[in-house]
Image (cartoon, rainbow, N blue to C red):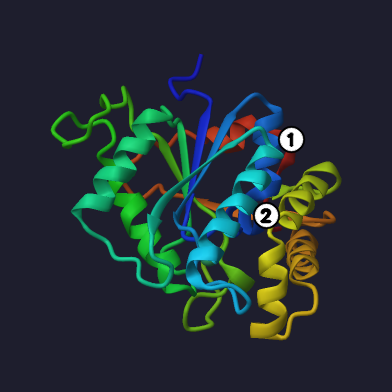
Amino acid sequence: MSRFPKNLLIIQAHPDDAEAWSAGTLALMAERGWKITIATMTAGGMGSFAMNERDAVRVRQEEATAAAAELGADYYCFNRRDGYLFDGEAIRIEVVTLIRRVKAGVVITHPPFDYHNDHRITHDIVDAATMVSSLPNVPSDEDPLPCTPVFYHEMPMNLTDFLGNPVPEPHFFIDISGSPLEKKMEMLTHHKSQQDLMRQMMGMEDFFGEMKVFNAELGKMIGVEHAECYWQHLGGGFPREPVIQDELAEFVRHRK
Ligand SMILES: [Zn+2]
């Protein structure tokens, strides 16, 4: 039996990030009996033209909760302000506490080279918090984990960094063709406010459809219909066991 409990915690900057970047993989893990928790640093209060910040926060948390429910997952918000996310002692301790409360065996967050400032700061906070989640001197109300979770980074938009340069080769891709992609699209559909926002802000007529196109581009790289991709944090400080790769072995692909 693995020393990593089958609890997967994905921590993102905004509601809809987990759905956009990782939902196909989350669906596959949920099918295999993993308990999924989706957390966001902010409720995405800036993400609306039609609503004020307070209403956007309320609506987007409702959307995120409904999307998570599609997986039987819980949704948790750290209630930081969208666009004004800062690293600091208090938020790191709150993240440690959540990691411990859900008894995470796997933690996923944004990559350190992501295009979005909130995503990069989320990465920094989650990286630091996950690394100390088993250490007894962290001032958290929850007991330390018996072992540090394995730590993964999901894909950034367009597979480019904040300068537009190509990112390092993903460690692995996950084939999400068929039902995992359908589940992902169902989850995204709950984020209706973002479809409206992207139309007005980016001129994207169909934001959800664009995500599907991106998954198809990734799929083409490995010869399947739709894919997501990941990096595992292997540079030190975290366990190196390939937990997701083993659990989803039949869906793991690499670029030739
Ligand atoms: Zn985001």
Q: Is mark 2 within 8 Å of ligand 1?
A: no
- Res 29 quadrant in image: top right
Picture coordinates of residue 42, whole percent (x, y): 44, 59
Residue at the outermost left position: 137
Residue matched to label 2: 228
Picture coordinates of residue 233, whole percent (x, y): 42, 49
Q: Which mark is residue 143?
A: none
Q: Residues within 10 Å of mark 1 (few under 14, many from 20)?
A: few
Q: Is residue 137 above or below residue 47?
A: above
Front-lying residue, 226 or 76: 76
Tell me which residue sits at (29%, 65%) in the image.
Answer: 86
Tell me which residue sits at (75%, 63%) in the image.
Answer: 221
Tell me which residue sits at (51%, 13%) in the image.
Answer: 1
Label 1 element class: helix
Q: Nearer the viewer, mark 2 or mark 1?
A: 2
Label 2 element class: strand
Observer able to see residue 173: no
Tell me which residue sits at (34%, 40%) in the image.
Answer: 238
Picture coordinates of residue 37, whole percent (x, y): 53, 38
Residue matched to label 1: 250
**What is the distance, in whole Å, between disc 2 and disc 1 at their CAs?**
14 Å
Front-lying residue, 201 or 219: 201
> Of the residues shown, which amino acid type is indicated by label 2?
Glu
The answer to whether residue 3 is left or right of residue 19 is left
Of the image marks 2 and 1, the number of the one nearer the N terminus: 2
The quadrant of the image that shows the C terminus is bottom right
